[in-house]
Image (cartoon, helix red, strand yellow):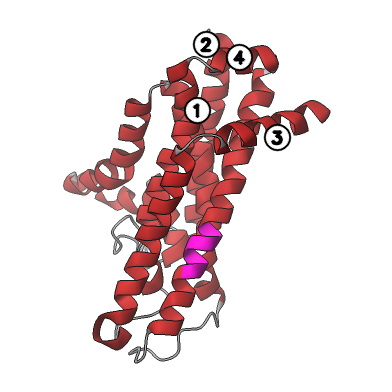
Amino acid sequence: MTTMLRTLSVERIKLLSTRSPYWCTVLILISVWGIALAVSLVENGRDASVASSQFGGRFGMLTFLVMAALAVTTEYRFGTIRNSLLAVPSRTVLLVSKTVVMALIGAVIAAVASGGAFLLTQALAKAPRDGAITLDSDGAVRMVFGYCALYAIGAVLAVGIGTLLRQSAGAITLLLLWPLLAEQLVLLISPLRDLVPWLPFNAAFTFVNGEDSGGMFGGLSGSDGPTPAQGLLIFGATALVIWLLALLTLQRRDA
């Protein structure tokens, strides 16, 4: 336990000693808050709602995935991973520590970004068509703070992919093209079209957007798609499988 706590502290210090986490956090806040601000001010916030206040959340999450992957690939790029492995002989402890630190940071960033977007929309929208913007239901709370769970799980996924690929360019490309392009292209394959809402990222966004608006760009899930809970489980299971593969790979190959 002492080794784990010490390693967690070291990983936190290493992460916060680089610039990329700060730049990525700024980009996340700009994208999430900026879109919420636009929704709130256009036509006095006529289209503002709890759901629309979170329109930027998906793009903020993609930025966080990049940030989490860089936490791993940067060490391989500069060769500092060797020092980490010498300092922490247990590779399992090392990877768990990196993942836990990124997951906790991700949950905090998500809470600040999504909560701030909601408060901006609530304060600035003067005439929302659907009435008062409040967290008056479980679904509304999930729309705002469900991103905490998605960011945390996303950290598991991104750390796993970063460990498997060990290159920033490859990891970032995969993490961006997977939700933005790959899962959407499956729509073009007629026999597989019904599976699209069940793909990991499409299912994940069902958790924060409801059964009728899943997917990276919305409008994918319906009566045949996953429920919010199922969507979260699919995303979590995918991240866990990739992370376990990364752990096995890390234990078997040289740094």
Q: CA distance from mark 4 to mark 2?
A: 10 Å
Say which quarter of the image contains residue 135: bottom right
Sequence-wise, the earlier of marks 2 and 1 is: 1
Q: What residue is shown at x 25% (from left), y 50% (from top)?
A: 193
Quadrant position of the N terminus in the picture: top right
- Residue 217 appearing in the image: yes
Residue at image position (75%, 30%) is: 6
> Of the residues shown, which amino acid type is indicated by label 2?
Ala
Choose mark 1 or mark 3, whichever is in front.
Answer: 3
Spatial distance from mark 4 to mark 1, Cα to Cα?
13 Å
List x then y, in percent, for residue 201.
39, 48
Could you tell me if the residues under marks 4 and 2 are in contact, i.e. CB atoms within 8 Å? no
Q: CA distance from mark 3 to mark 2?
A: 22 Å
Rendered location of residue 69, percent (x, y): 45, 34
Say the numbered circle drawn on residue 9: 3
Q: Amino acid at mark 3?
A: Ser
The three-letter code of the residue at mark 1 reads Val
Q: Residue at x 56, y 10 (%)?
A: 252
* Image mark for residue 255: 2
- What amino acid type should be assigned to the residue bearing mark 4? Asn
Q: Are marks 4 and 1 in contact (CB under 8 Å)?
A: no
User: Which sits earlier in the primary sequence, circle 4 or circle 2?
Assistant: 4
> What kind of element bears circle 2?
loop
From the viewer's perspective, is residue 183 above or below residue 220? above
Q: Position of residue 192 (x, y in %)?
A: 26, 45
Q: Residues within 10 Å of mark 2 (few under 14, many from 20)?
A: some
Q: Secondary structure at mark 1?
A: helix
Identify residue for label 4: 83
Residue ID for mark 1:
72
N-term mark: 1 or 3? 3
